[in-house]
Image: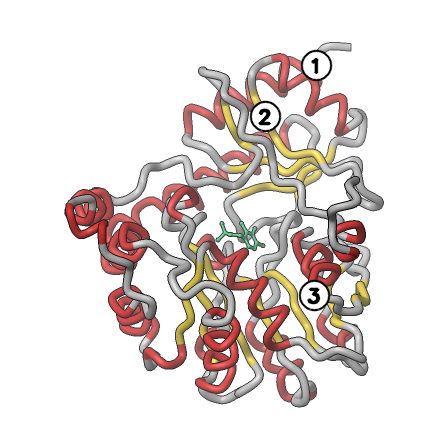
Amino acid sequence: MSKFWSPIVHQLTPYVPGEQPKISNLIKLNTNENPYGPSLKVLNAIEIETGNSLRLYSDPTSERLVNAIAQYYQLKPQQIFVGNGSDEVLAHTFQALFQHGKPLLFPDITYSFYPVYCKLYGIEAKTIPLNTHFEVDLSDYLRPNGGIIFSNPNAPTGHGVGPGEIEMLLRQNTDSVVVVDEAYIDFGGESTVALINEYPNLLVIQTFSKSRSLAGLRVGFAMGSEALIAGLIRVKDSFNSYPLDSIAISGAAAAMQDRVHFEYTRKRIITSREQLTAELETLGFDIIPSQANFLFVTHPQHDAAALAGDLRIKNIIVRYFNKPRIDQYLRITIGTDDECKILVDALRNIVNTP
Ligand SMILES: *Cc1c(COP(=O)(O)O)cnc(C)c1O
């Protein structure tokens, strides 16, 4: 607290990211990073960028990157917005596209940045409980609103809804923007991008942090109608003209173009996820079927916080949320097969020790 803070700063409840400890030999399964490195083509593109040209400002329109995304998804460049991580893209979306006076709807259990942005931008929030299977049921969202946002697949549950259900919502919800946060879509969900040309109020947000293994580069993007994208650009150009540096623009464009590395790593993660699910089930865990690069698990005989603590002693960190409804769950990122094996051995040891 400080008397020098503006009134709004006193009101904020900042997001608390998963920790990034500086410990060696750590098995880090707490923030859904990709266990595999980025494409070598990305590293080459970055190296080419790290020369004298860094004295120049980066391209304020990130044209190379916008074009690479447009080409990948068969959209017009005017339908793409890029930002400094999808967190920044989300922030601009909250400011540019959600109406005041009516509540923004989002699930009670979801990405915890959404309520943070509501406070920052003075948007009223109305949370809609997940159903008893911990699923987003979009028929619960057919009510007056100033916008709707959900992640698909959802975090931290990993459950995904299909494009048919999302289209049902879009057909009936035509007066406010529907945002689908597809941070994990490449791990088995079906993207809603295909509906963009039909529904002018649909915005799809993705990130390079998870499936393209570039969390440290900070690049995210939104796709939608030209009118929605123009609104985001107006906010961006009133906030920061150069949110992406030259290195990020080149590296992310190369990542979008390297489909081979992308397909190989994402399929490996999907395979490891299915193996890990089966092994944890044999240890007695209940697991929500996941379409993401993490599992959301609970054990009927073991307290989740205690499990997280026991794993930490063994240098394995997973994510525990001390929040209503999910305080007996752990969210575990899919690591390499070696990391998954070390995790399973550790958990076997923990759950079999009386
Ligand atoms: C990781 C994540 C993001 C943020 O991604 P960045 O691009 O790294 O900012 C957004 N939404 C969800 C649901 C996420 O899990």
Disc 1 vs disc 2: which is toward the camera? 2
Task: Quarter of the image for the N terminus: give it.
Answer: top right
Q: x%, y% of residue 154?
A: 62, 56
Find disc 3 in the rendering and name its residue. 121
CB at disc 1 and ligand 1 closer than 8 Å:
no
Report crowding for label 3: few under 14, some 14 to 19, many 20 or more residues within 10 A (C-alpha). some
User: In the rendered image of this protein, does residue 254 appear above or below residue 72?
Assistant: above
- Residue 317 is labelled as 2
Badge 3 element: helix
* Residue sitting farthest toward the top: 354
Instruction: Report how far apart the C-alphas of labels 1 and 3 lie in the structure.
Output: 48 Å
Quick check: 38 left or right of 186?
A: left
Q: Is residue 29 visible in the rendered structure shown here?
A: yes
1 or 3: tag closer to the N-terminus: 3
Q: Quadrant of residue 180?
A: bottom right
Asked if disc 2 is less than 8 Å from ligand 1, the answer is no
Q: In which quadrant of the rendered view does residue 25 lie?
A: top left
Q: Which mark is residue 352?
A: 1
Label 2 packing within 10 angstroms: few (<14), some (14-19), many (20+) = many
SS under mark 1:
helix
Residue kind at label 2, given as amino acid type? Ile
Residue flagged by tag 1: what amino acid is it? Asn
- What's the distance in space between the residues labelled 2 and 3, CA to CA? 33 Å
Residue 26's place in the image compared with 222, above or below, is above
User: What percent of the width, then of the height, locates residue 276?
Assistant: 53, 34
Tell me the amino acid under the disc marked 3.
Tyr
Left of 67 or right of it: where is 181?
Answer: right
**247 left or right, relative to 162:** left
